[in-house]
């Protein structure tokens, strides 16, 4: 089926999301590995993505693991260093799709407060036609409910959607619903897919 709309993940598609490399720089790789073995920071972040209050979750983890309290609090105090930089080519592709009158939606696991901070740092996050952000919906990828929420709110069939995400499990969940998909690896590969699907010309996709 002809693609009628594009759906974009945000982390590692439009902006970087690299907690481990951040901590490698901040405290060293060996200490980072020890901390991630001791503290399930990604599980903590999953609760934030489901709508839990960012600062409360981080502070709760810091109090639960006093040996790592300072490092855990970096997840709040230095979060923008983990969520960076903007992936400029992907941002240009978002804008090129909008100029070509292709509807573009965001579907992303993101906390409420972290998304508000990201919006201030990255104004292009306001440029989607619609946004489906897990913290506000109380549902996360790759669980079916968040995909269903998007489907229920738009006028396009699942087969008319092209979805890109950097995680295979999120891609698989969309494909199971009949969405067309692209596993995001690089902006150049994503640009090539958009050209292949006749959504953009080669010049527009630069």
Image (spheres, rainbow, N blue to C red):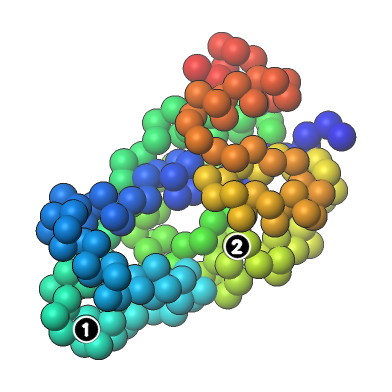
Q: Residue at x 60, y 21 (%)?
A: 192
- Please indicate, yes or no, whether residue 104 appears anywhere in the rendered image: no
Q: Residue at x 54, y 34 (%)?
A: 94
The image's mark for residue 1 is: none
Question: Mark 1 — residue?
Answer: 65
Asked if 181 appears above or below 199 in the picture, the reply is: below
Q: Mark 2: few, some, or many residues within 10 Å (few <14, many ≥20)?
A: many
53 relative position to 21: left or right = right
Label 2 residue SS: loop
Q: Residue at x 31, y 41 (%)?
A: 85
Q: Position of residue 203 (x, y in %)?
A: 56, 11
Asked if 170 appears above or below 180 in the picture, the reply is: below
Q: Position of residue 193 (x, y in %)?
A: 64, 26
Q: Position of residue 50 (x, y in %)?
A: 51, 74
Query: 5 or 32: which is nearer to us?
Result: 32
156 relative position to 150: left or right = right
Q: Mark 1: few, some, or many residues within 10 Å (few <14, many ≥20)?
A: some
Query: 67 or 182: which is nearer to us?
Result: 67
Which tag is nearer the camera, tag 1 or tag 2? 1
Q: Earlier in the sequence, mark 1 or mark 2?
A: 1
């Amino acid at each position: 089926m002809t693609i009628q709309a594009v759906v974009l993940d945000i982390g590692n598609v439009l902006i970087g999301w690299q907690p481990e490399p951040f901590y490698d720089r901040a405290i060293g790789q060996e200490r980072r590995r020890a901390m991630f073995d001791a503290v399930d920071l990604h599980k903590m972040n999953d609760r934030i993505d489901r709508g839990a209050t960012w600062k409360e979750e981080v502070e709760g983890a810091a109090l639960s693991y006093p040996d790592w309290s300072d490092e855990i609090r970096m997840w709040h105090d230095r979060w923008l260093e983990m969520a960076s930089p903007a992936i400029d080519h992907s941002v240009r592709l978002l804008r090129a799709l909008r100029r070509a009158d292709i509807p573009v939606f965001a579907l992303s696991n993101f906390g409420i407060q972290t998304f508000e901070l990201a919006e201030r740092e990255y104004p292009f996050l306001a440029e989607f036609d619609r946004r489906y952000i897990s913290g506000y919906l109380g549902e996360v990828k790759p669980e079916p409910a968040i995909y269903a929420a998007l489907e229920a709110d738009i006028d396009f069939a699942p087969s008319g959607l092209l979805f890109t995400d950097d995680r295979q499990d999120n891609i698989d969940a969309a494909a199971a619903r009949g969405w067309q998909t692209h596993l995001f690896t690089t902006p150049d590969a994503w640009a090539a897919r958009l050209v292949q699907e006749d959504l953009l010309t080669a010049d527009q996709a630069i």
